[in-house]
């Protein structure tokens, strides 16, 4: 084998090795938290609640008149289906709930996704919300979109300064949250809208807001999953009922 042929074989071998390493690393970094069986079960329709796949994700439709809508962004690298259990409970309270699907399970890749959900039912008053990174994206959307009448944050905080934003805002956080710690929230407290309702839920951790198992860096919850979802849904419903909700 001459030196030139050996060089090119060696060069392309290194190139393939590098490409394989990049792909493997990217897959490991972008590996998502999968939804649990409870989450997939919550995506099933029932006689009183229809769950329909849509171009933007899924929509939960309760029977009877609707009080309003909630478009929800999933947390970073969490399969959106994982949020079906608490969102289903919110829908059962009389709301059209849109669970948004985003590329690579990263809401930052589709920050305007909530527009599709709102456009499907423009007659409703809508809130936007999200968990963790999804809440950051929801806050950006609320800042620049007048169709979002209220903001719901689960274990999250705004990226931008929203202190001048005149929109009702709810922050729910578990006191066992090891990912978005209390000190981080305090550092960013001035960015929240002035009328934000801050609520700490005892015994809940960061992963309590979905059904995707334990999360790296989190502190284990001391409250059961179902009880946690009930509490999250109830606090969110109380907020929605007193801000955007119309009488059914």
Image (cartoon, rainbow, N blue to C red):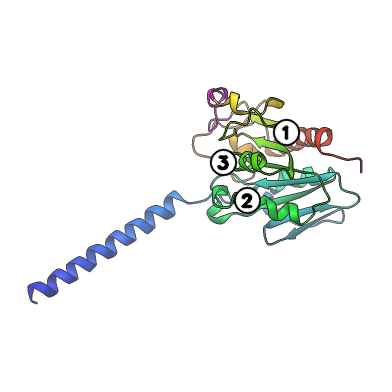
Residue pictured at 55% horizontal, 56% vertical: 103
Q: Nearer the viewer, mark 2 or mark 3?
A: 2
| Image position of 197 with respect to 116: above or below | above
Magenta region, residue range: 177-187
Would you say the residues marked 2 and 3 are in contact, meaning their CB atoms lie under 8 Å apart? no
Number of marks present in the image shown:
3
Question: Which of the 4 image quarters holds residue 134?
Answer: top right
Pair 3/1: label in front: 1
Q: Nearer the viewer, residue 178 or 188?
A: 188
Pick whichever, 59 or 139, lies toward us. 139
Quadrant, the N terminus: bottom left
Q: CA distance from mark 2 to mark 3?
A: 14 Å
Distance from label 2 to label 1 (Cα)?
18 Å
Image coords of residue 113 (percent x, y): 64, 52
* Location of mark 1 (residue): 167
Q: Nearer the viewer, residue 209 or 121?
A: 121
Is-magenta flag for residue 166?
no
Secondary element at image label 3? helix
Please give the name of the residue rendered at 87% of the width and 48% of the height, measured from the top-left corner: 66
Q: Residues within 10 Å of mark 1 (few under 14, many from 20)?
A: many
Q: Secondary structure at mark 2?
A: loop
In the picture as drawn, the residue positioned furthest to the bottom comes out as 1
Corner quadrant of residue 209: top right
Q: Which residue is mark 3?
A: 133
Q: Position of residue 25 (x, y in %)?
A: 38, 53
Q: Residue at x 18, y 71 (%)?
A: 9
Residue receiving disc 2: 112
Image quarter hosting the C terminus: top right
Per the image, label 1 sits on a secondary structure element best described as loop
Residue 52 location, x and y as percent?
75, 60
């Amino acid at each position: 084998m001459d030196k030139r042929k050996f060089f090119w074989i060696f060069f392309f071998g290194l190139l393939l090795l590098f490409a394989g390493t990049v792909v493997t690393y990217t897959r490991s970094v972008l590996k998502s938290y999968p939804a649990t069986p409870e989450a997939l079960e919550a995506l099933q329709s029932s006689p009183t609640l229809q769950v329909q796949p849509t171009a933007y994700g899924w929509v939960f439709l309760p029977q009877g008149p609707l009080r309003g809508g909630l478009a929800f962004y999933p947390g970073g690298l969490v399969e959106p289906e994982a949020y079906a259990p608490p969102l289903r409970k919110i829908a059962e309270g009389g709301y059209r709930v849109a669970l948004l699907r985003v590329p690579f399970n990263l809401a930052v890749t589709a920050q305007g996704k909530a527009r599709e959900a709102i456009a499907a039912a423009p007659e409703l008053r809508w809130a936007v919300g999200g968990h963790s990174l999804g809440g950051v994206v929801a806050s950006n959307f609320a800042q620049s979109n007048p169709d979002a009448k209220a903001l719901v944050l689960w274990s999250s905080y705004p990226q931008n300064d929203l202190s001048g934003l005149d929109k009702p805002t709810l922050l729910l956080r578990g006191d066992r949250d090891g990912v978005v710690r209390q000190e981080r929230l305090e550092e960013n407290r001035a960015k929240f809208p002035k009328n934000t309702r801050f609520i700490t839920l005892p015994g809940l951790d960061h992963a309590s807001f979905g059904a995707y198992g334990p999360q790296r860096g989190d502190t284990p919850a001391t409250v059961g999953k179902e009880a946690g979802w009930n509490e999250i849904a109830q606090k969110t419903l109380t907020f929605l009922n007193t801000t955007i909700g119309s009488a059914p």
